[in-house]
C-alpha cells in the first residue's frame, strides 16, 4: 500500500512542503532500498519496488497540486 499524507495512491491533494509518503510493500524475495527526496513544489510521487532478483512493481501516483 502507498499513501501520501494519509491519502491512498491515485489521490490528488493540496501541495504542502511536508510530504509524508508511507510505503508498505512485501515481496517474495529481498527488496532493494529506496531513497528519500524532499520536494517543496507541486509534484507527483509513485513507488517503484524492485527485488534483488529484479522483478519490479509500481504504484499509481499521489498528486500534490
Image (spheres, helix red, strand yellow):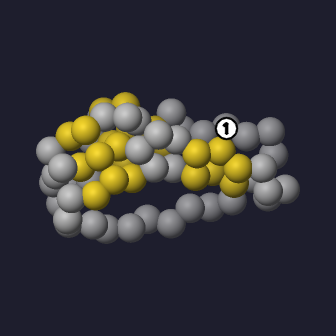
Q: Nearer the viewer, residue 59 or 26?
A: 59
Q: Residue furthest right?
A: 53
**Residue under the point 78% across and 50% down:** 55
Q: Is residue 62 visible?
A: yes
**Residue under the point 40% across and 36% down:** 9
**Residue under the point 31% across and 68% down:** 38
Q: List x then y, in percent, for residue 27.
A: 73, 40
Q: List x then y, in percent, for residue 54.
A: 79, 56
For the image, the number of numbered tags is 1
Mark 1 crowd level (few <14, some 14–19, many ≥20, 10 Å Cα): few
Q: Secondary structure at mark 1?
A: loop
Q: Is residue 22 visible?
A: no
Q: List x then y, in percent, for residue 13.
A: 20, 40
Q: Nearer the viewer, residue 19 or 62?
A: 62
Q: Is residue 35 above or below residue 12?
A: below
Q: Is residue 31 left or right of residue 4?
A: right
Q: Is residue 35 left or right of residue 37?
A: right
Mark 1 lies on residue: 26
**Residue under the point 58% across and 45% down:** 58
Q: Is residue 10 left or right of residue 40?
A: right
Q: List x then y, in percent, for residue 44.
A: 33, 53
Q: Say which quarter of the image contains residue 37.
A: bottom left
Q: Nearer the viewer, residue 19 or 58?
A: 58
Q: Is residue 23 above or below residue 35?
A: above
Amino acid at each position: 500500500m502507498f499513501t501520501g499524507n494519509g491519502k491512498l495512491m491515485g489521490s490528488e491533494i493540496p501541495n504542502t512542503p511536508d510530504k509524508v509518503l508511507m510505503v508498505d510493500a512485501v515481496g517474495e524475495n529481498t527488496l532493494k532500498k529506496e531513497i528519500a527526496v524532499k520536494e517543496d513544489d507541486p509534484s507527483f510521487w509513485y513507488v517503484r519496488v524492485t527485488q534483488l532478483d529484479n522483478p519490479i512493481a509500481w504504484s499509481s501516483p499521489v498528486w500534490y497540486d
